[in-house]
Image (spheres, grey):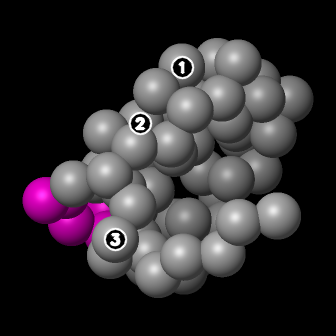
Amino acid sequence: MVTTLKNTVDNIVTEYGVAALRGKSLRERARALIAIAHPDHRDRLRHDAHKAGLLH
């Protein structure tokens, strides 16, 4: 397990792609991370991000 502050992470890699996070807003980060999440979870992640006010 690796723990780091969210502001120090530049890239996240999954089997579904790479999310380049450096310099992005919270909204842009949420969209980028959802895009590389497992497809079975993307709808729920979008729903939760919208509910949290990260997506409009």
Circle 2 residue? 19
Q: Give the image quarter of residue 1.
A: bottom right
Q: Is residue 49 placed above or below 32 in the rendered structure?
A: below
Are the two marked residues, 2 and 1, in contact with CB atoms closer than 8 angstroms? yes
Near mark 3 (Cα within 10 A), the count class, few <14, some 14-19 or many ≥20, is few
Q: Secondary structure at mark 2?
A: strand
Quadrant showing the C terminus: bottom left
Q: Which mark is residue 56?
A: none
Q: Amino acid at mark 3?
A: Thr
Circle 1 residue? 17
Residue at horizontal 32%, vertical 76%? 7
Residue 32 lies, in percent from the top left, at 41, 41
Q: Is residue 41 placed above or below 4 in the rendered structure?
A: above
Q: Secondary structure at mark 1?
A: strand
Residue 51 lies, in percent from the top left, at 59, 75
Residue at horizontal 64%, vertical 18%? 16
Are the two marked residues, 3 and 1, in contact with CB atoms closer than 8 angstroms? no
Which range is magenta? 23-27
Q: Is there any visible trace of residue 56 in the rendered image?
A: no
Q: Main secondary structure of the magenta part?
A: loop
- Is residue 25 within the magenta segment? yes
Task: Tell me which label, 3 or 1, sits earlier in the chain.
Answer: 3
Q: Is residue 11 left or right of residue 4?
A: left
Q: Amino acid at mark 2?
A: Ala
- Whole-Å distance between the Cαs marked 3 and 1? 19 Å
